[in-house]
Image (spheres, rainbow, N blue to C red):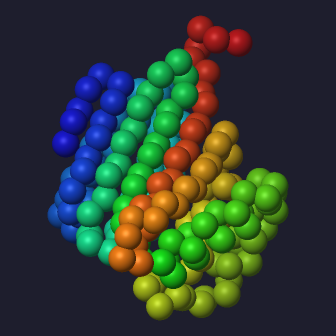
Amino acid sequence: MVIGKEHIQFQGAINEDIGANLTKLVLSAFSIYLHQASDAKRCTSVALELIDNAQRYARDGKIMFEITNSDGAVNIRLENLAGENDAMKLKESAEFVHQLSTDEAKSLYKQQLLNNTFGERGGAGLGFLFIKRKGVNTFEVEIKPAGAGQYICRCSVELNFYTSEQP
């Protein structure tokens, strides 16, 4: 793990204990980076959603998670190795959610909450809708072949915030 004034990076296997500690670290970092508690909560919820998805679908149980903070923008990047079906599903879901407006994402999120249907790995299909409805500035998903039917999946999110000195 690398921890700096405006940069945090974790790389390795993740389990419940590490996830709990990473959660505390992320919340603490955003509380320091951002002036408003609501902004810290918003960033933390987005980061934890990305971590949860990666933990659920990481083929080898390992992730690379990175947060950078500069000039009022928080960037969250997460990478994991996934099988071909999971990687393609990730890309399709991201492309679908990307074309939605924030209001459409909010509406679909509410519909899915009422659906009570879960996927084979326990997810309800809410992750990307949740992130989109949080009003992120950019949300990108990239997949690259890694050989032997595996893909490197990279999710990047940017959230912009203004400090009290900015208009």
105 shown above or below 39: below
Q: Residue at x 64, y 43 (%)?
A: 138
In the image: residue 119, left or right of residue 92 = left
* Residue at the farthest front position: 147
Quadrant position of residue 14: bottom left
Q: Locate the N terminus by quadrant.
A: top left
Q: Position of residue 149 (x, y in %)?
A: 41, 78
Q: Residue at x 26, y 70 (%)?
A: 61
* Residue at the farthest top position: 165
Q: Residue at x 46, y 43 (%)?
A: 76
Could you tell me how many numbered marks the image carries? 0
Q: Residue at x 30, y 36 (%)?
A: 8
In the image: residue 112, left or right of residue 147 = right
Q: Locate the C terminus by quadrant.
A: top right
Is residue 78 in sight in this rendering?
yes
Is residue 106 in sight in this rendering?
no
Q: Position of residue 87 (x, y in %)?
A: 51, 72
Viewer-closest of 51 and 13: 13
Q: Position of residue 125 (x, y in %)?
A: 59, 76
Quadrant position of residue 157: top right
83 shown above or below 69: below
In the image: residue 17, left or right of residue 10 = left
In the image: residue 78, left or right of residue 12 = right
Q: Position of residue 119 (x, y in %)?
A: 52, 88
107 shown above or below 114: above
